[in-house]
Image (cartoon, helix red, strand yellow):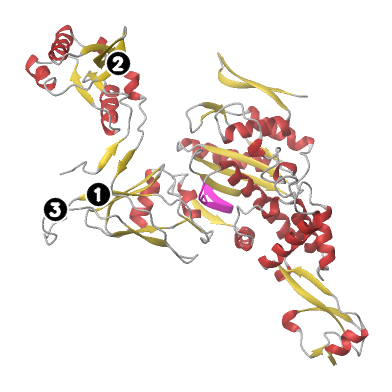
C-alpha cells in the first residue's frame, strides 16, 4: 500500500494531458512513465485498441487546462502524439472531451519527455543540528514522526517511507571523510552494502541529497561518512582499480587542517606564501619583524582597498602572521649563548630552563647569564623542520583548491584527495588534486599543480587518460593545470594548446554543449582577494556553462585562445581553434 497524504507535488501543469502510446515504441512507454513519476497528470491511450478498452480509459476525469482563445476562456485537453492515433481512437477522445465540455488541442510529445519535476513538499519535514567529533564515521539524524493509524504493536512492518536527508553545512570534518555523495547508483550501493545503514531497505544518492527507504516507524537513521578516496575511486567504476594517496600528500591533507581546511583561502595570499617559503629556507628560523616584512612587501592586492579599507598594510601583515602562529605551523626558538665556549644556538621553548647544557661543549651554563652576554632574540621556524620541497608542493595545491571552492559559490565541502593515485589497466597515474563538485556543476575535477617546475606532456597525458576513463563511465570531468609562476613558459603553453586541440564535446550540467577545455590558472589567478574584479569567479561569462565557461576564459587569458568553432566534415566532427600567435 502507499499514500500521498501530507505531500504536495509542485508543477505548473506542464505535460498534463492525453498521451498516445504505440506499444511497439519503447520511447513512448518510457516517456509516459517518466511523466507519471514526475507528477504529471497523464492518461495513456493506445494508438489502436478495442473500443471498450478505449472508452474505459477515457471514462476517468480528463486532465484539463484553462486557456483564453479569441478573448474567450475555455478548458482544453492536450493530446500528445495524435498523429499516431487511429481515426477510431481520435473519435473516441473527441466524444469523451465533448461530454465534459472540453476542447481537444493537439500537443507535442516533447513536452512530456522534457518535463522537469519542480519539487515535492511534505508536511513531514524537520531541521536538525548535530554535533560530532572530526573523526566520526557518521551522524545520527532524528526523523520527523509520521502519524500512523492502528496498533503500533503489530508484528509486521507498517510500511516503507522515503526519508530524504540533505546536509546543508558541515564544519570541522576530518578531511579524509565526506558527506557529499555523487549521484550514482554505485555510490548508493557503497552506502548500503559496505556501511550497512541500520534499518535501511533501500538507498539512493540523488542530486539534492540521499534518500533512505526506512520502516515508517523509524525515529532516526545513521547517515554514514565515506572515505573521500573511496568515493572518488568509485567514479571510475572499475573492480580492478587500486586507489591510494602518496605520503607527501597525506602531509598536505593534515597541514590543510591547520589553516581551516583546504578551502580556507590562506595560501591565496601572496604575502603569506612568501613568508612561509622564506621560513622553509631558514633552518634556524626568522625574526618576527622579518616575517611581517615579508608579508607586507609581497602582499599584492591584499588587503582589499574597498572591503578592508580601514586596514593598513602593516595591520594586515600583523594579522596574517598572527594567523600563521595560531595555526601551529611555526615554532618559537630563543637564541642562547654558552658562557663557556661562546657558541650561539637557537633552542625551542621545550628545551629552555634556568640551567642549559651546551650542545657543543657539553658544559652547563646559566640562562640568565647567557642573556647578559648576548642580547636574546626570538626566531620562528617551521614546525617539525618542514623541508622546502614539502612547502613547495603544499602552497599551489591549497591555493588551487580554494579557488575551485570559490568558483562554486555553494555550501558544503566536496570530497577531496590531494595526491590521488589510481592504477587502471596496469597504468598508475597521480593527480595532485582530485575532487567532485556537486551542486550546479556535477563533475569530477582532476588537477596538476606546480610552484616553479614545468607542466610537461607526461602530466597532461596522465590526466587526459583519467578523463577518458571517466567519460567511458558517463562521468563529466574537468582538468585543471595551475602554477604559481606569473605566466606559463612557451613550452607549457604549446603543450596545453595541443591538449585543447584534442577537445571533445561535453554536455554541461544545464544541458548545453561545450568543448572539454582545461581550466588553466597562473600565479596571479591564484592570488586574488575574492572581491577583486580579476578573481576567476568574476571573469565576464559568455554563457551559462558555469565552470566550463571559466575554463574557456582561462584559455584565452593564459594560452592565447582567440576563438573556436565546431566543424563537421567527412572525417568526423571536431573543434577548430584560432590562436593569438
Rounded to the nearest angstrom, the CA distance separating label 1 from label 3 is: 15 Å
Residue for point 75% across, 56% down: 272
Residue 226 lies, with reference to residue 211, above or below; the image says: below
Rounded to the nearest angstrom, the CA distance separating label 1 from label 2 is: 38 Å
- Identify which residue, 371 or 304, lies in the foreground: 304
Report which residue position mark 1 lands on: 161
The answer to whether residue 430 is seen in the rendering is no
Q: Which residues are magenta?
A: 411-427
Report which residue position mark 3 lands on: 149
Residue for point 72% across, 82% down: 350
Report which residue position mark 2 lands on: 67
Q: Residues within 10 Å of mark 3 (few under 14, many from 20)?
A: few
The percent coordinates of residue 297 (x first, y second) are 84, 54
**Residue 537: in magenta span:** no
Secondary structure at badge 2 equals strand
Secondary structure at badge 1 equals strand
Amino acid at each position: 500500500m502507499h499514500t500521498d497524504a501530507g505531500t504536495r507535488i509542485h508543477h505548473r501543469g506542464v505535460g498534463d494531458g492525453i498521451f498516445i502510446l504505440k506499444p511497439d515504441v519503447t520511447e513512448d512507454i518510457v516517456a509516459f512513465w517518466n511523466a507519471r513519476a514526475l507528477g504529471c497528470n497523464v492518461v495513456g491511450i493506445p494508438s489502436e485498441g478495442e473500443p471498450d478498452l478505449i472508452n474505459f480509459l477515457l471514462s476517468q476525469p480528463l486532465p484539463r487546462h484553462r486557456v483564453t482563445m479569441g478573448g474567450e476562456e475555455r478548458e482544453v485537453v492536450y493530446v500528445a502524439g495524435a498523429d499516431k492515433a487511429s481515426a477510431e481512437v481520435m473519435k473516441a477522445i473527441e466524444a469523451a472531451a465533448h461530454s465534459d465540455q472540453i476542447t481537444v488541442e493537439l500537443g507535442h510529445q516533447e513536452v512530456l519527455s522534457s518535463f522537469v519535476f519542480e519539487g515535492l513538499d511534505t508536511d513531514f519535514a524537520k531541521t536538525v543540528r548535530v554535533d560530532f567529533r572530526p573523526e566520526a564515521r557518521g551522524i545520527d539524524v532524528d526523523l520527523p514522526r509520521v502519524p500512523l493509524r492502528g496498533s503500533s504493536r503489530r508484528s509486521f512492518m507498517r510500511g516503507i517511507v522515503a526519508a530524504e536527508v540533505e546536509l546543508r553545512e558541515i564544519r570541522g570534518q576530518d578531511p579524509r571523510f565526506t558527506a557529499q555523495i555523487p549521484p550514482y547508483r554505485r555510490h548508493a550501493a557503497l552506502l548500503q552494502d559496505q556501511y550497512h545503514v541500520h534499518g535501511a531497505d533501500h538507498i539512493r544518492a540523488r542530486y539534492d541529497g540521499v534518500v533512505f527507504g526506512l520502516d515508517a516507524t523509524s525515529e532516526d537513521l545513521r547517515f554514514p561518512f565515506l572515505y573521500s578516496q573511496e568515493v572518488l575511486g568509485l567514479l571510475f567504476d572499475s573492480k580492478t582499480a587500486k586507489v591510494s594517496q602518496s605520503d607527501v600528500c597525506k602531509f598536505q591533507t593534515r597541514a590543510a587542517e591547520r589553516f581551516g581546511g583546504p578551502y580556507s583561502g590562506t595560501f591565496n595570499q601572496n604575502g603569506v606564501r612568501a613568508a612561509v617559503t622564506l621560513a622553509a629556507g631558514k633552518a634556524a628560523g626568522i625574526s618576527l619583524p622579518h616575517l611581517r616584512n615579508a608579508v607586507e612587501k609581497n602582499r599584492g592586492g591584499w588587503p582589499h582597498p574597498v572591503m578592508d579599507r580601514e586596514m593598513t598594510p602593516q595591520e594586515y601583515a600583523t594579522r596574517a602572521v598572527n594567523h600563521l602562529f595560531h595555526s601551529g605551523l611555526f615554532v618559537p626558538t630563543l637564541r642562547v649563548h654558552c658562557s663557556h665556549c661562546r657558541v650561539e644556538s637557537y633552542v625551542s621553548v621545550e628545551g629552555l630552563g634556568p640551567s642549559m647544557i651546551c650542545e657543543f661543549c657539553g658544559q652547563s651554563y646559566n640562562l640568565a647569564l647567557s642573556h647578559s652576554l648576548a642580547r636574546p632574540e626570538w626566531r620562528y621556524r617551521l614546525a617539525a623542520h618542514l623541508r622546502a620541497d614539502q612547502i613547495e608542493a603544499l602552497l599551489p595545491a591549497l591555493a588551487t583548491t580554494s579557488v575551485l571552492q570559490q568558483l562554486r559559490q555553494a555550501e558544503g565541502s566536496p570530497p577531496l584527495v590531494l595526491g590521488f593515485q589510481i592504477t587502471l589497466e596496469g597504468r598508475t597515474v597521480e593527480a595532485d588534486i582530485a575532487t567532485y563538485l556537486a551542486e550546479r556543476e556535477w563533475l569530477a575535477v582532476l588537477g596538476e599543480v606546480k610552484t616553479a617546475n614545468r607542466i610537461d606532456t607526461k602530466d597532461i597525458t596522465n590526466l587526459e587518460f583519467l578523463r577518458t576513463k571517466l567519460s567511458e563511465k558517463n562521468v563529466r570531468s574537468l582538468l585543471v593545470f595551475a602554477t604559481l609562476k606569473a605566466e606559463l613558459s612557451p613550452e607549457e603553453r604549446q603543450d596545453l594548446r595541443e591538449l585543447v586541440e584534442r577537445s571533445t564535446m561535453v554536455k554541461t550540467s544545464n544541458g548545453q554543449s561545450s568543448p572539454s577545455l582545461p581550466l588553466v590558472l597562473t600565479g596571479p589567478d591564484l592570488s586574488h582577494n575574492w572581491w577583486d574584479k580579476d578573481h576567476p569567479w568574476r571573469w565576464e561569462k559568455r554563457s551559462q556553462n558555469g565552470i566550463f565557461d571559466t575554463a574557456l576564459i582561462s584559455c584565452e587569458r593564459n594560452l592565447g585562445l582567440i576563438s573556436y568553432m565546431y566543424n563537421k566534415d567527412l572525417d568526423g566532427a571536431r573543434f577548430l581553434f584560432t590562436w593569438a600567435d
